[in-house]
Amino acid sequence: MRQIELVDAYIVRSQPWRESSLLYRMVTRNYGWISVLHRGARGARKNNGALPSLTPVRVSWGGRGSLQTLRQSEIAGPAIIQDGTRKIYALYVNEVISYLLPQDRRSEEIYPIYHQALEDLRAAADPECALRGIELDLLDLSGHSLRLEQTASEPVEAESWYRYDLDEGPVKVLEGAESEEMRDIVIRGATLLALQRRNGFEGDVRLEARRLMRRLVDHHVAPHVIHTRNIMRSMK
């Protein structure tokens, strides 16, 4: 029986398992995205309680079969994000990564990307703008990278309008095609370029970037629904 000893990790998602346990989905250093069972976590003993999300922890696990069991755990520092609004954005990131990644994915990329996402949300002057870059990183991580600077035949122009095709990327549209009924799929080149640079999200560009990323993320997590988005809408 193999056991992994005290690895840096974050609890991304937890759900009840039978009468008294929890099933964690965790981002772990060097081991990637895994599931671990925490037996008795919902029991009465306080020192055996559930591990918190958005907080660095160190965990050991092992066992036979595909479902491993938590053997040891410790809190490795304070919660990365404690501010209410930023915490909602971080919980949104947790939902997105849960739905984008397969059940188990062994990759050394996942932990540093997730850790940096939390740090960016904590430190950013404008956390919503930081969220756009995080969404791009998570899509890259899941194999759904976006083409933002180039159409199939030419560079994207800031003043032109584009439809973002899921297979082809930006597709230039005729002037005037940015009609109200098409606002959810047609955006300015300036918005695509702002996403590529990960800055410059002012005015209409900010709204268009949010709309485009919502559409793309929803497409790739379907049929799942991102529930934290309802809270995010109420904060606008």
Image (cartoon, grey):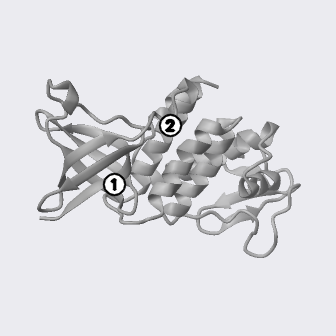
> Quarter of the image containing the N terminus?
bottom left
Above or below, 73 against 165 in this view is above
Residue 167 x %, y %: 59, 68
Residue reaching furthest to the bottom: 153
Q: For residue 7, which numbered disc appears in the image? A: 1
Packing grade of label 2 (10 A; few <14, some 14-19, many >=20) is: some
Q: Is residue 158 left or right of residue 185?
A: right
Q: Residue at (51%, 38%) from the top-left corner?
A: 90
Q: Badges 2 and 1: C-beta atoms under 8 Å apart? A: no
Packing grade of label 1 (10 A; few <14, some 14-19, many >=20) is: some
Q: Residue at (54%, 36%) from the top-left corner?
A: 89
Residue 219 appearing in the image: no
Q: Residue at (14%, 28%) from the top-left corner?
A: 43
* Residue at image mark 2: 80
Q: Viewer-proximal residue, 181 or 131?
A: 131
Amino acid on which disc 1 is placed: Val
Q: Is residue 36 left or right of residue 179?
A: left
Front tag of 2 and 1: 1
